[in-house]
Image: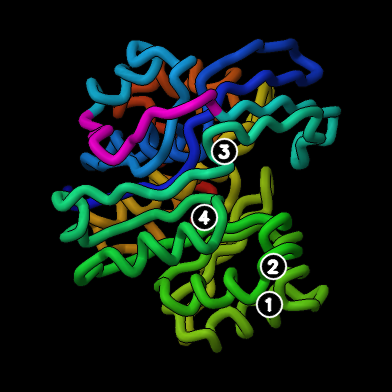
Amino acid sequence: MNIIILGTIGIDTLKTPFGLAKEVIGGSAVYSAYSASFFNECGIISVKGNDLPEKDISFLKKRGVSLEGVRTEGKNFRWSGEYEFDMNEAKTLKTELNSLASFEPYIPESYKDAGFAFLANIDPEIQLKVINSLKKPEIVVIDTMNFWIESKKDKVIEAIAKSDVLILNEGEARELFKTPSLVKAAKNSLKLGIKAVIIKKGEHGSLLFTKDDHFNCPGYPLEDVIDPTGCGDSFGGAFISHYSKSKDMKKAMVYASVIASFNAEGFGLSSLQKVSMDDIEKRYREMVSLRSF
């Protein structure tokens, strides 16, 4: 398996100004892996509960996603969230960690030779265990969130320093490096030894910083954002998967932004599951035109 994805498998209840979706399949690993599947095969490292039937995630296998690294135990992780008209931030209504609370990652032997890894938002100590299990990865991309920055900052920094690309949103960047300047936050990220940092700005796109370069990727101008849950994970999964073939971070960012835009157009994975490669290429060409002048 050339790409592995570490993250959660969740059962989500989502409320937005456009409606309510009860107990839909979600979680960072699910969004990331489905998005990655448009460009390459991948394998998941995660845990699901006995109350989540195998058939509910079997659609991932049809997309070339390996579930060999998924363990089944206890009750499934559940999350309930609500968005108001500012769709850039979710209000958490309820979180049930369940089997995620005692999750110990199982890394199959077939995963340890992976050249590419996306470590989605999860406990940084778990991220470190996965990083340390990989034999010689070419690129490790890591994500995090405010909760881990606040509660385990030292471990977050340690995990970032062992990775190659950091993805985080603008609020997390400012909090992690205690600065209102995203440019300073990016420079401080690079001082940890990573090759690149991507700062997500929601509907306004994302920024890429490397030691010698900077790139501003626009967000696709959507008329209706139905549910932004999983957009960041969709971005990360698509980015690592496209990069695994193209070796072009800028192009991978644009494709990742395209995938995330489709994800926002429906509850859960409902929109992405209707998308074809022709749809993706059409929107990619539109994105390229947005950057031409």
Rendered residue at 72%/55% (across/down) = 147
Start-end of magenta stretch? 64-76
Label 1 sits on residue: 185
Rendered residue at 29%/35% (across/down) = 37
What's the distance in space between the residues labelled 3 and 2, CA to CA?
18 Å
Query: Counting residues from the N terminus, which is met first, the one under dot 4 or under dot 2?
Result: 2
Label 2 sits on residue: 173
Amino acid carrying mark 2 in the image? Ala
Q: Secondary structure at mark 4?
A: loop
Query: Counting residues from the N terminus, which is met first, the one under dot 3 or under dot 2?
Result: 2
Query: Counting residues from the N terminus, which is met first, the one under dot 3 or under dot 4?
Result: 3
Is residue 133 toward the left or the right of residue 110 in the image? Answer: right
Label 3 sits on residue: 231
Label 4 sits on residue: 291
Is disc 1 in contact with disc 4, using a CB cutoff of under 8 Å?
no
The label nearer to you, 3 versus 4, is 3
- Tell me: residue 268, above or below residue 246: above
Query: Counting residues from the N terminus, which is met first, the one under dot 1 or under dot 4?
Result: 1
- Residue 38, image x, y percentages: 30, 34
Q: Secondary structure at mark 1?
A: helix
- Tell me: residue 246, above or below residue 29: below
Query: Counting residues from the N terminus, which is met first, the one under dot 1 or under dot 3?
Result: 1
Which is more toward the observer, 146 or 264? 146
Is residue 135 toward the left or the right of residue 92 in the image? Answer: left
